[in-house]
Amino acid sequence: MGKDVIIACDFSNKEEVISFLLKFKEEKPYVKVGMELFYGEGPEIVKIISSMGHKIFLDLKLHDIPNTVNKAMKVLSKYNIDMVNVHAAGTILMMEAAIQGLTRHDGSRPLLIGVTQLTSTDQERMKSDILIDRPMEEVVMHYAKCAKKAGLDGVVCSPLEAGKVHDVCGKEFLTVTPGVRFADNDTGDQKRVTSPSKAKVLGSDYIVIGRPVTLAKDPVEAYRRCLREFVG
Ligand code: C5P
């Protein structure tokens, strides 16, 4: 599977996203559409971005009873998207129902990725709020194994966990990793950050990067720098 850089287009409306994407004259970056943009603009935003020639990771992190997730995925399978995700905490049954709903009549489907533990949840919160007292790494690896068992294509995790996920689930199992900053960048609110070149060494398959590209003086050059460092 080829490595790629996914730009988190965390803009609040379609005008901002379109004007951002129009800066790219030569490349067609892979775009992550998150909840704010999708709920604000509706499915039309997916149509617009895909008609501009971009691949789309629809980051809606579904988590509900299996039947509901299955039906929601049936709807999403009609969109021109390349990747979508669910919370692995929803159980293997829920993830299996998700795949079943996402698979089109011809057998094709977008990649389905499991969210392990959000990077905003630390060990202490996991214990106090959701009564999980196992070490974070064990929890992430367990969720990754469950996602693989359910037939998912990979997980969202920290680049620092990518190598271990590959050890546990195999090289073909994808790791999609946010928390990326250039070595000379401000880290902002991301706590555990890794540069694109370090993420490459650690074995990430896709890096997800937002503000270091979207807020850069020259976003196209910042994106090219990611490609140079991560894809080579
Ligand atoms: O701007 P920045 O590079 O921090 O954006 C990272 C993107 O990845 C955001 O869209 C954020 O919601 C998402 N994300 C994350 N950490 C996770 C899961 C998703 O930063 N664990």
Image (cartoon, rainbow, N blue to C red):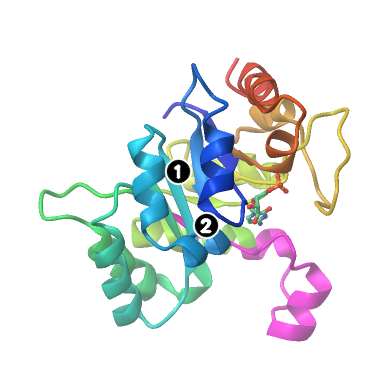
Write the start and end of the magenta stretch as one range: 111-139
Q: Is residue 138 left or right of residue 93?
A: right
Q: For the residues labelled 2 and 1, say whether their Cβ atoms are less than 8 Å apart.
A: yes
Mark 2: amino acid: Ala
Residue that numbered label 1 is attached to: 173
Asked if the stretch drawn in magenta spans residue 120, the answer is: yes
Residue that numbered label 2 is attached to: 144
Residue under the image location 85 percent in, 48 percent down:
188
Between 27 and 127, which is closer to the camera in this rendering?
27
Tag 2's secondary structure?
Answer: helix
* Residue 205 x, y percent position in the rendering: 53, 35
Residue under the image location 77 percent in, 80 percent down:
127
Q: Is residue 185 left or right of residue 161?
A: right
Q: Is residue 225 left or right of residue 53?
A: right
Mark 1: amino acid: Phe
Residue 230, image quadrant: top right
How many labels sit on residues?
2
* Residue 153 x, y percent position in the rendering: 40, 48
Quarter placement of the C terminus: top right
Residue under the image location 35 percent in, 74 percent down:
69
